[in-house]
């Protein structure tokens, strides 16, 4: 049986260490940003971008964890991994297509999962000078200032981000966007799921939805959004760590209607 006191000390140590790690990883990523000739850009698949910076940042993070917390496992977008009792989940650069094109909408996303439940979340957008932090039960902040999600209750005044996944039919995505437009919402897409969830958490948008997303894109954001008061679907179900799931993160006042129009059930 887990000891709450022991878990609390363990999580505190990781929370503080991860903040420093995220800052260092952001510096590494920024050292490549804007240097198109040095990025060694390639494609893992249709609209699935990869740069040398992705692998470099993930390897650096794995080395940090091996030194600081040698008993912890790491799951990363570039080098894989699997479920474990103490698991770090990292997307070294979320929004790689933006990163490769010189668009500042990208981030380093780090989540810590204990016994299958996300406990810590850090999203660092160094090109924007922004850092979201959260610990389950401890609130969420942006650059040290507490955040809350939108209080909007009118879909006709809402802005919703709808992420697009190559793993789902395009018609499904277009259907959701069409229905949301018909209800009066403004719909956008910025090509970073992690930032999409973060923006819903601090009220820049009213919701983020995607019919399939991987764990490394949202493991951090789930904690941040939950602590900011968002309603969230049951993303952490099934083999979510290795296979992903749909994601819905929404302000409480519009969550039910967004759930209905997207077909993604709330928890």
Image (spheres, helix red, strand yellow):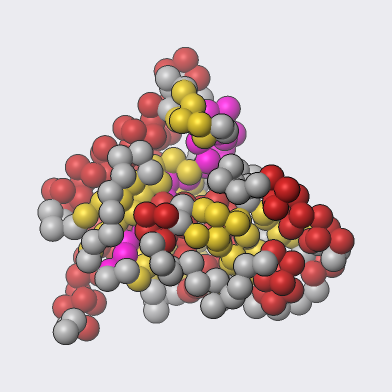
Residue 108 part of the magenta segment: yes
Asked whether, in this view, residue 250 is left or right of residue 241, the answer is right
The magenta stretch spans residue 231: no
Q: Residue at x 46, y 23 (%)?
A: 42
- Which residue occupies 80% across, 73% down? 154
Q: Is residue 169 left or right of residue 180?
A: left
Please provide percent x and percent y for residue 113: 31, 65
Quarter of the view holding residue 252: bottom right
Dividing the image into 4 quarters, which one contains the C terminus? bottom right
Determine whether, in the image, residue 178 is placed left or right of residue 264.
right
What residue span does the magenta drawing correspond to? 95-114
Q: Residue at x 28, y 54 (%)?
A: 82
Above or below residue 163? Residue 5 is: below
Between 130 and 167, which is closer to the camera in this rendering? 167
- Tell which of 209 and 244 is nearer to you: 244
**Residue 162 image position (x, y, % from top left):** 67, 54
Location of residue 126 in the rendering, given as x and y in whole percent from the top left corner = 46, 43
Vertical placement of 91 versus 224: above or below? above
Most foreground residue, 33 or 52: 52
For the question of whether residue 152 can be seen, the reply is no
State whether residue 159 appears in this view: yes
At horizontal 27% and vertical 71% (from top left) the residue drawn is 115
Please identify the quarter of the rendering in which residue 112 is found: bottom left
Q: For the view shown, which residue lies furthest in the top direction? A: 37
Q: In x, y percent, where is residue 22?
A: 35, 49
Q: Quadrant of the N terminus?
A: bottom left
Q: Is residue 53 left or right of residue 265?
A: left
Q: Count the marks.
A: 0
In this orientation, which residue lies closer to the viewer: 85 or 109?
85
Eyeballing the image, is 167 above or below 42?
Answer: below
């Amino acid at each position: 049986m887990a000891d709450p006191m022991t878990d609390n000390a363990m999580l505190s140590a990781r929370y503080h260490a991860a903040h420093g790690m995220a800052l260092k990883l952001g510096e590494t990523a920024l050292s490549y940003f804007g240097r198109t000739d040095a990025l060694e850009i390639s494609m893992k698949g249709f609209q699935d971008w990869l740069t040398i910076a992705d692998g470099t940042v993930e390897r650096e993070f794995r080395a940090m964890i091996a030194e600081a917390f040698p008993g912890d496992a790491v799951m990363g977008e570039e080098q894989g991994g699997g479920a474990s009792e103490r698991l770090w989940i990292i997307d070294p650069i979320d929004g790689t297509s933006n990163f490769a094109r010189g668009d500042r909408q990208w981030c380093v996303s780090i989540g810590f999962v204990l016994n299958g439940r996300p406990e810590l979340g850090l999203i660092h957008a160094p090109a924007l000078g922004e850092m979201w932090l959260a610990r389950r039960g401890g609130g969420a902040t942006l650059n040290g200032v507490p955040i809350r999600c939108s209080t909007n209750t009118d879909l006709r005044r809402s802005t919703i981000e709808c992420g697009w996944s190559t793993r789902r039919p395009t018609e499904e995505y277009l259907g959701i966007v069409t229905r949301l437009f018909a209800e009066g919402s403004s719909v956008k897409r910025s090509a970073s799921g992690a930032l999409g969830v973060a923006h819903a958490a601090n009220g820049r948008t009213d919701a983020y939805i995607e019919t399939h997303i991987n764990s490394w894109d949202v493991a951090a954001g789930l904690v941040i959004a939950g602590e900011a008061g968002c309603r969230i679907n049951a993303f952490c179900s099934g083999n979510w760590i290795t296979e992903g799931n749909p994601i819905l993160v929404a302000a409480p006042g519009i969550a039910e209607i967004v759930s209905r129009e997207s077909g993604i059930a709330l928890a």
